[in-house]
Image (cartoon, coloured by chain):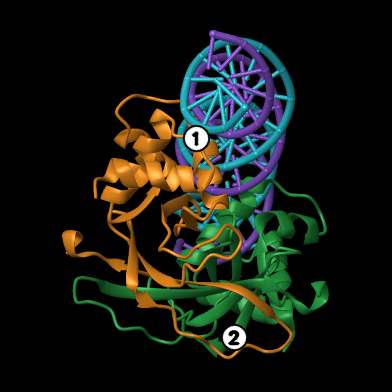
Chain colours: A green, B orange, C purple, D cyan
Amino acid sequence: MKTLKIAEDLLTSHGLRRTQIRLEILQIFMKSEHALAVNDLEKLLKASHDRVTLYRALNSFEENGILHQTPDKSGNMRYALCAEGCSGHDHKDEHAHFICDECNQTYCLQDVKIPDVKLSDDYQLNSVSYTMNGVCKECQ
Amino acid sequence: MKTLKIAEDLLTSHGLRRTQIRLEILQIFMKSEHALAVNDLEKLLKASHDRVTLYRALNSFEENGILHQTPDKSGNMRYALCAEGCSGHDHKDEHAHFICDECNQTYCLQDVKIPDVKLSDDYQLNSVSYTMNGVCKECQ
DNA sequence: CCTTAATAGCAACTATTTTGCGTTATTTTC
DNA sequence: GAAAATAACGCAAAATAGTTGCTATTAAGG
């Protein structure tokens, strides 16, 4: 299936409008193997757009369970497509992330499931994130 | 042992100067059960100080393995005391963190060790972080 | 004491993200 | 289809976090 078609379906199925930018953003995420910062996104977009537009699109996607966010080591937000089965407030994003200390890129390790830990009853758990830092293949 | 004495020892043993602010900062961290943002720290300090001073103190502590940092969900940096055995570039900070979605506070779960995962040889691992989100006891 | 090197504090700057508001354009409805 | 409704865009401005350069202090060691 073509990425454009998938992007269109993603938007429609979440009641969002199919605008040029949003379609392009989604296609970029589909082609990317790692999480992207707003910065990265700006560079990958054909035309230049207002950052506000990007932020609003990304937030909307996040609220609708299309994307999920993780801050990188320095605290900047990065976004990546959710696996299927995400819904806005109940992210099933239970895979680990790897962030390269050299190139600072975030890899979504879809096949690395996050192991559980024992947690005291004092805490009511909603979601978990597992992030590894190190050096990726490219940078070794 | 009094917190002041501990703070003094921490500074001296790392070759740092025992200034008023730094002693106070360290004591605040010793009394706090959760990780603090620069913002929190400002409120907890008796007198008001320049934010730059706080940032520089915190960075210095981090480099010397006295504190470690974790970004919270929204990407803001939070700091907490390291367990013993941390050194500047080889943090042994292998415990999990819990961040409350309500009050946004970060709890250091010193006794919850981070479990390992299998990682492809493509990645060279340096450090790991495990963060849980949910609702803490206070907020339930 | 006196030196010197670390630290504090001020000013200014960069980067990220958010908010308000008028305009544009996609959807919906007739 | 055309008009109405409203989601999304884009500009301006501002809030927030963190950094850098520089000078003034001050702790530590002779």
Along the horizontal axis of the image, is A124 left or right of B125? left
Disc 2 crowd rating (10 Å Cα; few below 14, some 14-19, many 20+) is some
Asked which secondary structure carries label 2, the reply is strand
Asked which secondary structure carries label 1, the reply is loop
Q: In which image quadrant can residue A123 be found?
A: bottom left
Residue C5 lies, in percent from the top left, at 65, 31
At x 38% / y 49%, what residue is drawn?
B36
Residue B53 drawn above or below residue A72: above
Q: In which image quadrant can residue B90 be found?
A: bottom right
Numbered disc 1: what chain? B
Note whether residue B131 is visible.
Answer: no
At x 59% / y 53%, what residue is drawn?
A55
Mark drawn on residue B111 = none
Name the residue carrying label 1: B17
Residue A137 lies, in percent from the top left, at 78, 79
* CB atoms of marks 2 and 1 within 8 Å: no
Q: Mark 2, mark 1: which one is toward the viewer? A: 1
At x 52% / y 82%, what residue is drawn?
A95
Residues at marks 2 and 1, CA–CA distance in whole angstroms: 46 Å
- Amino acid carrying mark 2 in the image: Gln
Q: Quadrant of the N terminus of chain A?
A: bottom right
Along the horizontal axis of the image, is B132 left or right of D11? left
Q: Nearer the viewer, residue A7 or B110?
A: B110
Residue C17 drawn above or below residue A28: above
At x 70% / y 60%, what residue is drawn?
A21
- Amino acid carrying mark 1 in the image: Arg
Note whether residue A100 is visible.
Answer: yes
Q: Nearer the viewer, residue C23 or B53?
A: B53
Q: Nearer the viewer, residue D8 or B117?
A: B117
Name the residue carrying label 2: A110
Residue A88 drawn above or below residue B11: below
Q: Quadrant of the C terminus of chain A?
A: bottom right
